[in-house]
C-alpha cells in the first residue's frame, strides 16, 4: 500500500491541520481496537490544493460546490457554477457568453463580494493560471488586472469548486483581497465518462450543445495514472428581437413636466433664491420617466434629412463632407461635429419644452430672439430661459419694456441685475411653457412644436403666429426616394426629445433589432494529467491544459453611421449638396418643395455596407503546463513533506472585424458628375491639391507608433523605439487613385467596389505569458501537549509579460475608433511565506469547555518589479518605464475554538494586497472619449456632491478665472466696468444654464509606474455546528468585514474635475488628494466646456468597505432513519441552504469613509439578501433535485447611479422579491447509462438584471430545458 503524506502537499497549513484534527476527532472507529493492536489513522492528502472544505472545516468562510451538485444543476461551463453561489458578485449575465469589449470578447470573470474582479484570485488545483485579460483599458468594466476567464476551465473535469472569501492571501499571495476561487480537477481517474447535452429556450432560441469525455487508467501496478479529458461546446447567439419584452426597446426619457415654485412671490430676490420654476434637483419629480417602447429617427437607414446650419458650408466643388468647425486649432483637434453645434439650437432640445426655453418660438439664435422680442408687444410668447438681448444694453432695455408691458413698477434702489432678474421672473410667471401651452391646446399638430422649438427639421411656414413653423420630417426610403415620416406617437402628455419618441413605428429605428443578448461561442478544452510514483515517497505529476474559445458577435455595427446627434468628429452629420450625382431629379424637386435648394444635412445609418456576414470574431488560445515533484519523508522522529513545481502558460487572443477607413470614406462620399459618369471629386480637376491635406471630418490623435511608421512627417522619428506622435491623417495619391464613389441615399444602393474601398479588415492581438516556480516544505517542529507544532514554508517566483498591439490602421486611429495603444511590458514577482499551526488544546486533554483550541498564524512577503518597452514621447524624449515596488507584508491570524465537540467558533484577522498590474503601470498612451454630461459645474450637477456649497463656490471661482463667453455674454461673463456684485450675479446666471456644448471630449490615458499596491484589511468571525443528536446536519454562519483602500482605478479627467471642484483647498488639491494636484488635468475651452487635451491615467484613491453575513447549512439523511424504520429503503434525502446578507456596501471616493461615502446595499445590483435552497432525493436508479434562488426586494437607481440618490437626482424603481426555481430528474437506465432532464427557471419568470429596465441585460429570457445523456464505467 502506497504511503500517504501527512501534511500539506501544497496545502494551506492553517486550514488543513484544523481539518485533520477535526476529522480524527469526529470519526469514531466502528469496532474497538484490540489492546496492544496498532491502529493506523489515514493521513490527510491535499493534492495540488491549498483549500480543503472551507465551508465547514476551515477557518475562512466560503462555499463549496461538489461534483454531484454540478451534475444535478446541469452545469456545462465553470462560470455557471460560480453564478449559482450567492456570495459571488453580479456576474456576467446568466444569458451571456461574456464581455462585449473587443480586447477580451467573450471572457467571463469572477467577482467575489462584488468588489471588483481584479481582486479575486483564480486557482486551478491550488496554482495560478495565466491571465486572459487584455492589455488595455477597453476590457470588461474597464478593469485591467490578472483575471482568468472561467470559460477556459474544463467543466467536465471539475471535481469541486472551493470559494474562499477574505483571508486566503496569506497562503496564495497577491490579488486575493476578496478571496480565492479554486477549481479542483479530478485526478487519479479510472474509467470512462462520456456526456452529451443540449440546452435551449422554450421558444427554440439559443441552443447550447455540449460534449465532454473523461477517461483515465492506472498502469504499472497503479504507480502511473493518466487522465485525459475533452470539453467541447457550441452556443448559439441570442437576439433581443426574438423576445417580445426586449424587442420593444424600452428606456428612459427626460421628465416631460416642469414644476413651478408654489412659494414664489413676485419681487426682487437674491440670485441664490429659488425663482419661478423649481430647479430639476429640487422639483420633487424623477428626472426621467420609463417608456415601454420608443423609436429613434436621428440616423435612419437610408438617411434622415435635416436643414443644414447656414454657417456650415461645403468646400468649393464638394458635394458631400462631414462637418468640421473652421475655427479648430491647437495641439488637439477641437472640432465639433455637425450635431454638437451651438446654443442656436440645431438638432437638440425637447419637442415640447416643459421649462423656460425660447422666448419666441422659431427665434433660435440670440440675434433672432432679440429681433422677435423687439417686434412683440408682450416681448415673449413663451416663458423664456433668459432675458432677450445680445448685449447688456439690450437686456436692460427689454427689462424696462417688460415692466411697462405687464404693469409692474420697478422697485426703487434695485440694481440693474436685480431688475433684469425681476423682469425675467415676470415673463416666466405670466407666460406658459411650450408644454403648458400644448396641454391647454391638445389638438394642435405636434409638428408645430417640433418645427418651432427645434431648429433643423425641414418645414414650412404654419401661419400660426405663436408656432410659426410646422415641421415636415423627411428621410430617404430604401429605394432612395424622399418621403415624409412621423417622428413618433406624440401627444401633449408624452415625453420626447430630439431624435427619439415613444411609439412603435416600424419605419423608424429600433435599437433592439441589432442588440445581441448573447454571442455565439465555440469552446474546446483539452486536458492531459498524469501522476507517476517514482518511489513510495516521491511522486512526479503533470497537468496540461489547452483551451480554444471563439466568440462571435454576429452584429458588428462598428460606427457605420453619421449623425447630427453624434459627439464624434468622424461620425458627425454630412453636409450634402443638392448637386450630388446620386440624387435624382425627383429627389431635388421634393427637397425644393420644403425650401432645400442648396445643401442639407444627412444623418444616416449605413450598416448595410457590411453585407450579410458582418461579424466581429475573437479567438482565445490558452495553454498551461504544470510539472513537479512532491513527496514526504520521516526524520528525527517527525513527518515532513515537500512540493516543487514549475508552471508555464500563455494566452493568445486575436480580435478581427471590419472597420470603416476614415480618409477613404470622406473621399468616397464626395462624388461629382463628369460627363455622365459619377466619380470621386478627388480624381477630377475639382479636387486638385487634395493630396497631402486633411479633409473635414478627420480627427487627430496622440498615438504611439512603431519606429518603422512615421505618422507625422513633420516630426522626425528619433532612434529605433516607438514614439508618441500627434497624428493627423492626410490624403495620399494611392487613396485618390483607388477611390470609388459611395451612394448613401437609400439602403443597399452602394456598389461593391465602393464598399471594398472604404472597408478594411482590422485586428488586435493580446499575448500574455507566465512562468511560475513554486515550492513548499512543511512538517512538525515539536510535539506539544495538544499535538504537533507544525510549520510550512513556501516560496514562488513569477515572470509575467503582456504584449498588446494591432494593425497599423488601428494603431493610428484611422478606423473610426480610438487608436490601439501599444503595451509591451513584464513584471516579476517574488513571494515567500511561513505558516504555523499551534494546537493549544486537543480533545484528549479533557479540559472543560475547551474541546479544541488552535491558532494558525501565517505571514507572507511580496516583492514586485517590472519594466516596459522604451519609447519616446511626443517631444522625442526617451522613456524607459520601470517599477520597483516595496516589499509588502501579508498576514493572517486565525483562531479555531470548540467549547464542545458539536460546535466550533472560528475567526481570523488578515491583511492582503493587490499589486498594480501591467496595464496599471505601463499602459501605452491610449486616447479615449469621455462624456461631458458629468461636468460637476453643469447646471444639473453643481448643487450636488458631498458639499454643494463648496462645489458651487469653486465653479464660480473658475468662471471668474477663465471668463468664458456665451450667447448672452459674448464678451465674457466678467465685465470689468461692472461692480463685483453685478459680476457675481452674471457668474451665477451663467452657471444656472451652463451645459456642455460638446457631448464628449478626447483624453489620453497612460500607465502610472508610481502606483502603490491596494491594501485590504479584513476580519471574520463565526461558527460551525455539527450537532451529534442530529447526525448528518452541519451549518455555519460567518460575519465578514473587509476594507480596501488605495484602490487602483482610472483617473479620468472627469474624475479629476470632480475632485478639483469639490476640494476644500481649491485650486490646489494636493492636501486633499494624496499629494496630487488634479485641477491642471482638466482643460476647458472659451465656452467653459471640458475639451481635448485633458489628462487621464491611474491612481491610488478611494476605498470600498463591505460587511456581510455568509450562512450555509446541509442535512443529509436516510428517510427510513428519520421515520424510525431504518430497515426499509425509502431513499436518501439531502437538504442544503446558503444565504448571503449584505449588511453594508460603502464606496468612499477619498478612502476616508466620511461624508462623501455612498451606501449601495439594497440596490438591484447589491440586494440585502440572496438565498439559495436545495433538495435532492435518491432511491435506486432515480435521482431528483430542486434548487430555488430568492432575491430580496431591491431598488434601482438611474442617472448618476447611487451617488447621493434623492427623488430629484435619480429615478428610483423598486423591484419585488422573486424566486427562480430549477429542477432535475435523472434516471440510470443501465448501470452505465443515465438520462437527465433539467428545467431552469421552472415557472418562466422574467426577472431584472442590473439596470435592466434602463438598457441593461435581463438575467433570464425565460424557461430553458437541458437534456443530458451520461455514459460511464
Image: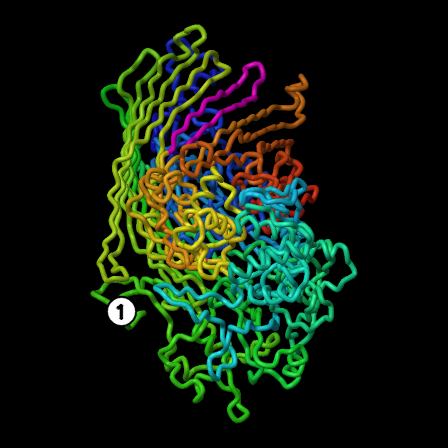
Rendered view: 1083 above or below 895: below
The residue sitting at the right extreme is: 443
Magenta range? 1016-1043
Q: Main secondary structure of the magenta part?
A: strand
Camera-nearest residue between 1032 and 29: 1032
Residue 240 drawn at (x, y percent): 63, 56
Camera-nearest residue between 1166 and 391: 391
Residue 1235 left/right relative to 965: right
Task: Check disc 1: other Cα within 10 Å, few if <14, some if 14-19, many if 20+.
Answer: some
Rendered view: 892 above or below 567: above
Residue 140 drawn at (x, y percent): 46, 50
Q: Quadrant of the N terminus?
A: top left
So how many labels did they put on this image? 1
Residue 705 left/right relative to 1183: left
Rendered view: 481 above or below 544: below
**Residue drawn at x 63%, y 43% as measured from the top left:** 283
Q: Quadrant of residue 1248?
A: top right
Residue 1032 colored in magenta in the image: yes
**Residue drawn at x 69%, y 44% as measured from the top left:** 1244
Camera-nearest residue between 987 and 1011: 987
Residue 266 left/right relative to 89: right
Residue 471 colored in magenta in the image: no
Q: Quadrant of residue 910?
A: top left
Camera-nearest residue between 261 and 393: 393
Which residue in the structure is indicated by mark 1?
715
For the residue labelled by badge 1, is the local secondary structure a helix, a strand or a loop?
loop
Residue 769 in view, yes or no:
yes
Amino acid at each position: 500500500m502506497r504511503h500517504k503524506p501527512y501534511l500539506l502537499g501544497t496545502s494551506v497549513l492553517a486550514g488543513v491541520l484544523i481539518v485533520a484534527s477535526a476529522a480524527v476527532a469526529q470519526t469514531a472507529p466502528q469496532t474497538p481496537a484490540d489492546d496492544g493492536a496498532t491502529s493506523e489513522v489515514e493521513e490527510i492528502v491535499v493534492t495540488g490544493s491549498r483549500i480543503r472544505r472551507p465551508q465547514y472545516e476551515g477557518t475562512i468562510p466560503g462555499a463549496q460546490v461538489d461534483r454531484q451538485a454540478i451534475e444535478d444543476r446541469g452545469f456545462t461551463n465553470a462560470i455557471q457554477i460560480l453564478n449559482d453561489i450567492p456570495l459571488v458578485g453580479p456576474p456576467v449575465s446568466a444569458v451571456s457568453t461574456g464581455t462585449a469589449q473587443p480586447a477580451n470578447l467573450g471572457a467571463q470573470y469572477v467577482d467575489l463580494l462584488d468588489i471588483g474582479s481584479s481582486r479575486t484570485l483564480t486557482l486551478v488545483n491550488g496554482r495560478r493560471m495565466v491571465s486572459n485579460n487584455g492589455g488595455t483599458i477597453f476590457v470588461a468594466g474597464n478593469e485591467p488586472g490578472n483575471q482568468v476567464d472561467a470559460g477556459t476551465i474544463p467543466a467536465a473535469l471539475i471535481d469541486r469548486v472551493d470559494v474562499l472569501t477574505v483571508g486566503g492571501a496569506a497562503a496564495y499571495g497577491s490579488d486575493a483581497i476578496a478571496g480565492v476561487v479554486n477549481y479542483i480537477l479530478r485526478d487519479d481517474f479510472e474509467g470512462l465518462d462520456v456526456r452529451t447535452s443540449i440546452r435551449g429556450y422554450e421558444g427554440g432560441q439559443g441552443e447550447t450543445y455540449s460534449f465532454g469525455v473523461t477517461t483515465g487508467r492506472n498502469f504499472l501496478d497503479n504507480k502511473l495514472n493518466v487522465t485525459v479529458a475533452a470539453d467541447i461546446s457550441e452556443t448559439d447567439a441570442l437576439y433581443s428581437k426574438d423576445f417580445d419584452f426586449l424587442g420593444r426597446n424600452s428606456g428612459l426619457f427626460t421628465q416631460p413636466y416642469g414644476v413651478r415654485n408654489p412659494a414664489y412671490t413676485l419681487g426682487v430676490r437674491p440670485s441664490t433664491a429659488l425663482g419661478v420654476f423649481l430647479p430639476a434637483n429640487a422639483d420633487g419629480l424623477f428626472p426621467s420617466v420609463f417608456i415601454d417602447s420608443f423609436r429613434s429617427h436621428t440616423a435612419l437607414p437610408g438617411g434622415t434629412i435635416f436643414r443644414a446650419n447656414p454657417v456650415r458650408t461645403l468646400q468649393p466643388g464638394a458635394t458631400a463632407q462631414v462637418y468640421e468647425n473652421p475655427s479648430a486649432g491647437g495641439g488637439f483637434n477641437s472640432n465639433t461635429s455637425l450635431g454638437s453645434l451651438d446654443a442656436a439650437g440645431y438638432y437638440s432640445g425637447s419637442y415640447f419644452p416643459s421649462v423656460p426655453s425660447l422666448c419666441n418660438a422659431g427665434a433660435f439664435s440670440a440675434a433672432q430672439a432679440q429681433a422677435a422680442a423687439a417686434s412683440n408687444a408682450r416681448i415673449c410668447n413663451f416663458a423664456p430661459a433668459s432675458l432677450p438681448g445680445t448685449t447688456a444694453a439690450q437686456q436692460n432695455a427689454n427689462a424696462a419694456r417688460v415692466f411697462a408691458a405687464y404693469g409692474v413698477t420697478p422697485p426703487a434702489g434695485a440694481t440693474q441685475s436685480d431688475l433684469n432678474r425681476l423682469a425675467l421672473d415676470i415673463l416666466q410667471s405670466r407666460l406658459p411653457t411650450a408644454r403648458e401651452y400644448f396641454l391647454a391646446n391638445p389638438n394642435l399638430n405636434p409638428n408645430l412644436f417640433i418645427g418651432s422649438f427645434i431648429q433643423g427639421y425641414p418645414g414650412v411656414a404654419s401661419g400660426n403666429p405663436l408656432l410659426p413653423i410646422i415641421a415636415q420630417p423627411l428621410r430617404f426610403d430604401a429605394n432612395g426616394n424622399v418621403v415624409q415620416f412621423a417622428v413618433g406617437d406624440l401627444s401633449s402628455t408624452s415625453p420626447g426629445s430630439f431624435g427619439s419618441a415613444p411609439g412603435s413605428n416600424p419605419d423608424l429605428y429600433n435599437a433592439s433589432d441589432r442588440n445581441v443578448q448573447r454571442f455565439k461561442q465555440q469552446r474546446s478544452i483539452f486536458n492531459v494529467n498524469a501522476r507517476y510514483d517514482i518511489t513510495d515517497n516521491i511522486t512526479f505529476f503533470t497537468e496540461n491544459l489547452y483551451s480554444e474559445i471563439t466568440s462571435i458577435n454576429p452584429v458588428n455595427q462598428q460606427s457605420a453611421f453619421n449623425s447630427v446627434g453624434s459627439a464624434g468628429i468622424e461620425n458627425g452629420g454630412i453636409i450634402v449638396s443638392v448637386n450630388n450625382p446620386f440624387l435624382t431629379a425627383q429627389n431635388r424637386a421634393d427637397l425644393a418643395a420644403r425650401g432645400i435648394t442648396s445643401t442639407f444635412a444627412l444623418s444616416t445609418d449605413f450598416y448595410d455596407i457590411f453585407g450579410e456576414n458582418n461579424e466581429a470574431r475573437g479567438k482565445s488560445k490558452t495553454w498551461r503546463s504544470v510539472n513537479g515533484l512532491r513527496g514526504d519523508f520521516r526524520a528525527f522522529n517527525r513527518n515532513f513533506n515537500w512540493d516543487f513545481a514549475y508552471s508555464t502558460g500563455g494566452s493568445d487572443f486575436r480580435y478581427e472585424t471590419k472597420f470603416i477607413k476614415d480618409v477613404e470614406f470622406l473621399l468616397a462620399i464626395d462624388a461629382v458628375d463628369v460627363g455622365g459618369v459619377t466619380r470621386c471629386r478627388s480624381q477630377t480637376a475639382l479636387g486638385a491639391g487634395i493630396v497631402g491635406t486633411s479633409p473635414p471630418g478627420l480627427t487627430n490623435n496622440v498615438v504611439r507608433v512603431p519606429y518603422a511608421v512615421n505618422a507625422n512627417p513633420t516630426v522626425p522619428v528619433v532612434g529605433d523605439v516607438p514614439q508618441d506622435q500627434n497624428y493627423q491623417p492626410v490624403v495620399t495619391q494611392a487613396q485618390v487613385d483607388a477611390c470609388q464613389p459611395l451612394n448613401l441615399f437609400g439602403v443597399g444602393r452602394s456598389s461593391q467596389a465602393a464598399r471594398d474601398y472604404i472597408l478594411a479588415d482590422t485586428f488586435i492581438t493580446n499575448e500574455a505569458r507566465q512562468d511560475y516556480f513554486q515550492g513548499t516544505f512543511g512538517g512538525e517542529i515539536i510535539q506539544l501537549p495538544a499535538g504537533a507544532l507544525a510549520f510550512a514554508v513556501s516560496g514562488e517566483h513569477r515572470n509575467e509579460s503582456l504584449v498588446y498591439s494591432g494593425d497599423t490602421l488601428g494603431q493610428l486611429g484611422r478606423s473610426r475608433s480610438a487608436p490601439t495603444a501599444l503595451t509591451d511590458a513584464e513584471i516579476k514577482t517574488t513571494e515567500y511565506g511561513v505558516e504555523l499551526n499551534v494546537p493549544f488544546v486537543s480533545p484528549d486533554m479533557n479540559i472543560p469547555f475547551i474541546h479544541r483550541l488552535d491558532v494558525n498564524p501565517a505571514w507572507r512577503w511580496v516583492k514586485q518589479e517590472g519594466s516596459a518597452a522604451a519609447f519616446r514621447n511626443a517631444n522625442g524624449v526617451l522613456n524607459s518605464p520601470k517599477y520597483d515596488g516595496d516589499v509588502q507584508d501579508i498576514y493572517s491570524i486565525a483562531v479555531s475554538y470548540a467549547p464542545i465537540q458539536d460546535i466550533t467558533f472560528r475567526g481570523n484577522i488578515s491583511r492582503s494586497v493587490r499589486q498594480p498590474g501591467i496595464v496599471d503601470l505601463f499602459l501605452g498612451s491610449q486616447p479615449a472619449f469621455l462624456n461631458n454630461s458629468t461636468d460637476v459645474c453643469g447646471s444639473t450637477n453643481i448643487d450636488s456632491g458631498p458639499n454643494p456649497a463648496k462645489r458651487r463656490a469653486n465653479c464660480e471661482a473658475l468662471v471668474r478665472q477663465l471668463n468664458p463667453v456665451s450667447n448672452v455674454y459674448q464678451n465674457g461673463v466678467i465685465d470689468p466696468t461692472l461692480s463685483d456684485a453685478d459680476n457675481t450675479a452674471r457668474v451665477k446666471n451663467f452657471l444656472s444654464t451652463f451645459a456642455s456644448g460638446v457631448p464628449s471630449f478626447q483624453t489620453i490615458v497612460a500607465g502610472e509606474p508610481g502606483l502603490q499596491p491596494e491594501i485590504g484589511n479584513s476580519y471574520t468571525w463565526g461558527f460551525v455546528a455539527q450537532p451529534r443528536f442530529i447526525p448528518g446536519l452541519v451549518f455555519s454562519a460567518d460575519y465578514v468585514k473587509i476594507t480596501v483602500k488605495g484602490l487602483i482605478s482610472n483617473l479620468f479627467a472627469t474624475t479629476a474635475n470632480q475632485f478639483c471642484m469639490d476640494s476644500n483647498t481649491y485650486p490646489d488639491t494636493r492636501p486633499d488628494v494624496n499629494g496630487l494636484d488634479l485641477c491642471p488635468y482638466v482643460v476647458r475651452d472659451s465656452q467653459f466646456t471640458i475639451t481635448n487635451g485633458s489628462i487621464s491615467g491611474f491612481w491610488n484613491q478611494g476605498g470600498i468597505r463591505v460587511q456581510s453575513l455568509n450562512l450555509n447549512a446541509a442535512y443529509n439523511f436516510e428517510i427510513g432513519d428519520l421515520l424510525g424504520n431504518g430497515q426499509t429503503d425509502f431513499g436518501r434525502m439531502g437538504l442544503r441552504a446558503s444565504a448571503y446578507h449584505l449588511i453594508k456596501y460603502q464606496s468612499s471616493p477619498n478612502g476616508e469613509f466620511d461624508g462623501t461615502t455612498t451606501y449601495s446595499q439594497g440596490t438591484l445590483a447589491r440586494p440585502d439578501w440572496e438565498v439559495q435552497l436545495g433538495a435532492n432525493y435518491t432511491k435506486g436508479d432515480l435521482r431528483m433535485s430542486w434548487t430555488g434562488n430568492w432575491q430580496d426586494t431591491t431598488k434601482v437607481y438611474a442617472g448618476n447611479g447611487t451617488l447621493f440618490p434623492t427623488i430629484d437626482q435619480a429615478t428610483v424603481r423598486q423591484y419585488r422579491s422573486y424566486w427562480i426555481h430549477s429542477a432535475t430528474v435523472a434516471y440510470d437506465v443501465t448501470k452505465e447509462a443515465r438520462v437527465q432532464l433539467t428545467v431552469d427557471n421552472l415557472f418562466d419568470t422574467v426577472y431584472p438584471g442590473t439596470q435592466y429596465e434602463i438598457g441593461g441585460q435581463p438575467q433570464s429570457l425565460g424557461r430553458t430545458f437541458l437534456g443530458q445523456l451520461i455514459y460511464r464505467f
